[in-house]
Structures are given as C-alpha cells and as structure tokens.
Image: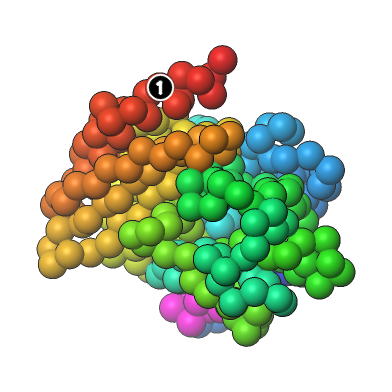
Amino acid sequence: METVRIATRKSPLALWQSEYVADQLRQVHPGLHVELVPMSTRGDEVLDRSLAAIGGKGLFLKELELAIQRGDADCAVHSLKDVPMELDAPFALPAILPRHDPADGFISNLYASLEVLPPGARVGTSSLRRQAQLRALRPDLQLLDLRGNINTRLAKLDNGGYDAIVLAVAGLERLGLGHRIVGRLQAPAWLPAPAQGAVAVECDAGNARVMALFAALDHAPTRSCVEAERAMNRALHGSCHVPVAAIAQWQGSDLHLQGLVGSAGDGRAVRAEAIGPASDPEALGQQVAQRLLDGGAATILAELSL
C-alpha cells in the first residue's frame, strides 16, 4: 500500500490541521495510507521569549524540513502565516487548502468588546502586528506578552493574568473553541497576518510523487489571495519582527488587497489598498507594498531596522 508520512508539530492545532489534510488526501486518493510524524520544534519549546527574539516563525519549520530531507517524512503541514516568504531550496508548497476565517478573535471573560475595555486593561498578545493595531486603536491599554499553544493561552486568561487576549479565529474554531470568541476583529478596521487562516503543505519540489498527490488539494482561489498578501509582505521584507498585516478578498474576477505597516511602540499605522487582476497576485502585492512605503511605511521600517 502506498504511504505518505506527514511531519507535524505536536501542538493540538498543528495535529488537527495535519489530520485534516490527511483526511482530505485519503478522500481524493482512496487506498492511500497516510500517517502523521509528530515532532517538537524550537518554536514550541522556547516560551519565555517572543518569536522575534528567538529567530522568528521559521523556527516552526526547520525541524520539519530536516525530517523531509532525512527521509523521515514526505511532507509537512503548516499554518501558512508561519511559513517564511522565501522557501529554502528544494522546498515547495504543492497545496494550499481552502482558507478558514482569517479574522482575529477578541477573547475575554469580563468585557464584551475591545471598545469597552477600561483604561489600563491588560491585553495579552506577543504578535507585533496585533500590538501595533491595538496601540493605534487603544493607546491606553497595557499590552503583555503571551506565548504557548491555544489552550495554554486561554488558561492564562482564565487564571486572571489578563483582562483579554487576541487569538486567530481559525485556530479557535478548528479546535472547537469558537464559543470563547467574544467578538471578531476584522477588515477593514483590523487586518490579519498575511495568509492567516490558510493551511499549506510543504514538500521537496523534486519529489514528483508527493507533488502530484497533493496537487488535487490545492484551492486556487485561496492561493491567489495568499500569494498577493505574501508578495506584499515579501516586498516589505516583512517577518515576525515587523508589524505587517494584509488581507486579499475576491471582488468579481479581481482581488482587493488591503495592507498595513504599524509600529508596536507608538501605534503609528500606514494603510494602503489596491484592486488588480487575480491572474497576477504578485504584481498586486508589490503595488500595495509600494503605496505603503510611499505613504510612510519606509520610515517605520527604517526605525525597526536600527
């Protein structure tokens, strides 16, 4: 029996996403044996510092890529927002699955919305993108770091360490925790991370068998959107060190891309948008990136690189 081995992180969300991909693969290839290869990554193990401080979101990928290169796995499944803008050779993304809700969720046991939080309320997030937008909307809040998997973060909220936290809607709903969402933070007032809510499969581009097996799972409408968002981020040299947000949405046969570059320190935010043909998401992403730079993002990015 033909077998495909999927490398995955051990967090509940990563396991859910990998099992979801495995199920989809079994449906389109009946008789295929699919198994998970759970692994721990440095990004999961170091929880006392921000991702930016320990090397960025690429830490979630490296061990999984090494497993593919060693032959311990045929592919890996990732949250696409954690995948670097440029993949190292010889890796490729043969499948990007249909996107879930890309919004962020506002979670609190005490307050019904971000707007009604009292001055000085403690809000947990380690994301510079979320911090920048929170600072822009509510400069009076106290922003505190928050690391760990989804259940760990919710437990820290429930134990009284925070008045509210912000998490991706997709992760909460995938784990059956959608009831914890008090409100959605969404476009146009609030923008998500580029590719938030999308799941991608990574494999060795030279492995024709695996590339072909996963091609059937690729969702072209989602790929167009996230390629525009990632192209914008790439043009800005964005990473988890830089507060960059983006969302592309279909508008007829075109894509409408909205982007933001912010400052987590003082809440400054530069926004730009454009509409372009879905057939060229790369050009659309570059266009919005240039508008952001011309509108003041270049100054913010220069300060962050000091």
Is residue 70 visible from the viewing direction of this image? no
Q: Nearer the viewer, residue 115 or 84?
A: 115
Is residue 136 visible from the viewing direction of this image? yes
- Write the residue at 40% across / 22% down: 299
- Write the residue at 48% across / 82% down: 27
Q: x, y (%) of residue 191?
A: 42, 55
Q: Which of 180 and 237 is in front in this view?
A: 180
Position of the C terminus, as image quadrant, is: top right
Tag 1: amino acid = Thr
Magenta stretch in the rendered image: 23-29
* Residue 268 located left or right of residue 254: right
Q: x, y (%) of residue 106?
A: 58, 68
* Residue 241 located left or right of residue 86: right
Q: x, y (%) of residue 63?
A: 72, 43
- Seen in the picture, residue 140 relative to 235 is either above or below; the reply is below
Q: x, y (%) of residue 232?
A: 34, 39
Magenta-drawn stretch contains 212: no
- Seen in the picture, residue 242 relative to 151 is either above or below; the reply is above
The way the protein has been coloured in the rendering is rainbow
Numbered disc 1: secondary structure: helix
The residue indicated by pointer 1 is 299
Question: For the stretch drawn in magenta, what is the main secondary structure?
Answer: helix
| Quarter of image, res 178 | bottom right
Q: Nearer the viewer, residue 117 or 228?
A: 117
Position of the N terminus, as image quadrant, is: bottom right
Q: Which of 16 and 54 is in front in this view?
A: 54
Q: Which residue lies furthest to the top in this view?
A: 306
* Residue 211 located left or right of residue 68: left
* Residue 83 located left or right of residue 175: left
- Write the residue at 81% across / 72% down: 158
